[in-house]
Image (cartoon, rainbow, N blue to C red):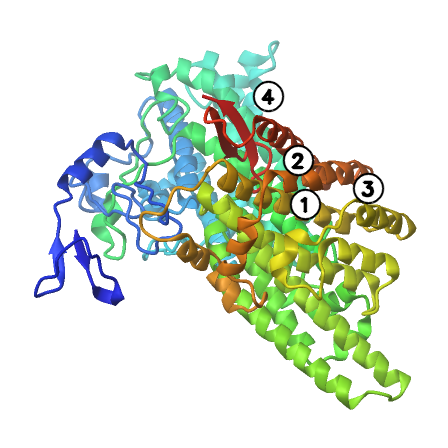
Amino acid sequence: MATTEKRGVKDDRFPSTGEQTVWADVSPLLTSACNDLQDGELIHGENFSLFAAMSALEIMDPKMDSGIESCGYRSVEEAIENGAAPIPLSSDRTVDVQCTIDVMDHLLACEATWHKGHSLAQTIFSCIYLLKLERTSSHALLHSYCRIIRATCNAVISVVSDARTHEEEDLFTMAHGLPLKGEGDEKCLSMLNAVEETISRQLRACKAPSSKKKVLEDIEPLQTNLDLEEGFCKALLCRIRFRKHFYHVLMCMRKPQGRGLDLARKHIAACLSELSCIHKSLGFLRSNACGSSQDDIEDGTTASGCQAVGFDASLNSRLLAPTPPRSIRILSWKKALEYYEKLLQDLDIICSFSLDPLLEGVLRFVVQFQRSQPDLVARAHLQLLLVQDGKLYGRDPFYDVISRAIGDQEVQKNKFVGHLGQLVINLLKILCTNAAWQRRKLGKILQDWSVTSVQVELACKIECEEKSNTSADENACLKLSKALLIWTEEQTYWIAYRFLMLGFELELYSPNEYCMVYWFMYIILIKLLEKAQLRIAGSIDTSEAQVCLYELFVDKDADLSHLSAKRKGKKKRELSKDASRDAPMPPSILLLQCYIFLSEGLAMMLAALCNEHKVFQRPGIFNTEQERFIQHFELLQKARILDHISYVLFEEWTFRSCFSTVVKYNYFGDVQRISKELKNSFAGDPDRLAEVRQIEQVAVHNRIALNVINHAGGHDPSLNVSFEFSHHPCFAVAVVKRS
């Protein structure tokens, strides 16, 4: 470990040498860390996380740490010659059927592992039958199943490639020269239907007790043990039908303008039903399998617990140079079923979307959808649904989407609308990426929105100077330009707010940084509220009621350092209540008020804990609080969306914070009061209603904790305060305990 003066950093604890470097032995530290860490854990510094580090290496993670197994065959031919992939799978027909089901199950597990980001070569195409598909032509069941597996892989690769989300998992679309496409794959459904019909006839024959023996003479059974025939038929049919319906889901969701979504939902329901049947087949298959045990179910890749024949995970690593030489672990059969159930539920949510033409509704849907942490395939489908041929849902030009958001079709004439349309497209695509990529890209696109906002504002000023005291038509044109400016600024603040929220979801903030984050979030939300209210009003000149609303939150003539002093007691609060009765606020505005009160209340509460109870005052080992402030908000400050917001301002604000102020202004009580009204407004919207209940619970618990801390006074050493995210992923709840 070197302590160096490079980059202008000097450690005075170590004397300088000729090379300006001093070495210290860290072996005891590493040994101690190794003894304490469990598998999958990281050494987590105050300002370091796996998401924040660009070159982090997690030892033994197959996606990050390459390794190779030395065993395995050297070629496909060698594997076949040694009987690794026999056709038929066994000379015993009962065992042949069982082994075929095992191959189906293992392929399902391999496919789920591939969806999770591993390469095709070491998952699905570890199957020797897929590498030499022509060999299976004499085995109709296995041949048709392998065909539809390959066709499904092509459909998934097409979706992910078109959405360009494969860069998250750079191995996902790489074929490595594998036989991914073959002649006759387009007939995979007809082949599978023929096999399904044959097995269905055999199942019907099994269920005809009076003529069972006679029918079985006409229809050749799958295997020799007639007592097991029905169970094997059912196990095969549910697997075949799942593959068929899943392929239909992928095809229907690719139809332009969302025309196939209703049909896709029907196939999704059928898939989920077949998954349930697949799971039910577990008992039958395990009871009739040889050499399996119940202990295999958590790790085994087949329902029977037996190892599937015809697979060699290391085969392609030897054959294909581009394939990473690593040893991966295939998901268990149980985990694979859980993955597909989650994937289908996510796809069903996408298909149930009403294709809202309003951008606000689209953004809300995408953010809500991302809370369930969908995987790559589902997010790729969502992106392709939203953006098709440069249009929303492939039907609405984005200049028209912007016009609807502003409320005037004449806005389309503005020269900036085309550029803003492209920014909206980029924003939607970014929101469909995973949380880590999303946050990083939002920080970059924020500057594009900010620059465009400045350009629109400059154009408005020039237009205003040129068209003062002119005709009414020209003044109307100026009014539209100002409306476009307000909308652009509103989207910029929304992106900044989303950027900060993602930091909580990714666990990028430590507890002693929560205060500065909520403070910054509070300021952004105030600006977002201001722009949203101006847009809804449809005029730059607001009514008296709207002015009262602004005064409750922002004193535009005052310096932002006095944000906490803007409340002037009960008189102004009552004035605001009277004004809101005269001009009812839209539910979206009231919801923003709730988030403002939550952010301000949490920031004040955390600052007061720091000042009066000395909680979260632990000094940084590697950097100062000011350096952490710069690191967290650097992208926001570079975008210049909030001028004059600095660490000095935050420090002055926190210095004045105390519990008497927090209790006096009753931030969390205001959230509870507004939440009651919002519950009625969102009675018909389950998602919004759940959101309101979440923030209400945060407010209730924090109000109780605040009262407990306040009554205890500032000199109670037995009082321990911590924060957890038990009711909302981004707004913390204080937990007060006595030691």
Q: Nearer the viewer, mark 2 or mark 4?
A: 2
Mark positioned earlier in the residue sequence (2 or 4): 4
Q: Position of residue 464 (x, y in %)?
A: 77, 84
Residue type, numbered disc 3: Ser
| Alpha carbons under labels 2 and 4: distance apart | 60 Å
In the orientation shown, which residue stands out farthest toward the right?
Answer: 582
Element assignment for label 2: helix
Disc 1 vs disc 3: Cβ atoms closer than 8 Å?
no
Q: Earlier in the sequence, mark 1 or mark 3?
A: 1
Identify the secondary structure beneath mark 1: helix
- State the residue at coordinates (53%, 32%): 714
Classify mark 3: helix, strand or loop.
helix
Determine the CA span between mark 1 and mark 3: 19 Å
Residue 261 visible in the displayed image: yes
Residue 597's disc is 1
Q: Nearer the viewer, mark 2 or mark 3?
A: 2
Residue 408, x across and y down, in percent = 82, 70
Distance between mark 4 and mark 3 Cα atoms? 54 Å
Earlier sequence position, callout 4 versus callout 1: 4
Residue type (three-letter) at the residue carrying disc 1: Phe
Compared to residue 598, the image places residue 543 above or below, namely below
Q: Residues within 10 Å of mark 1 (few under 14, many from 20)?
A: many
Q: Quick one: 234 or 321, which is closer to the camera?
A: 321
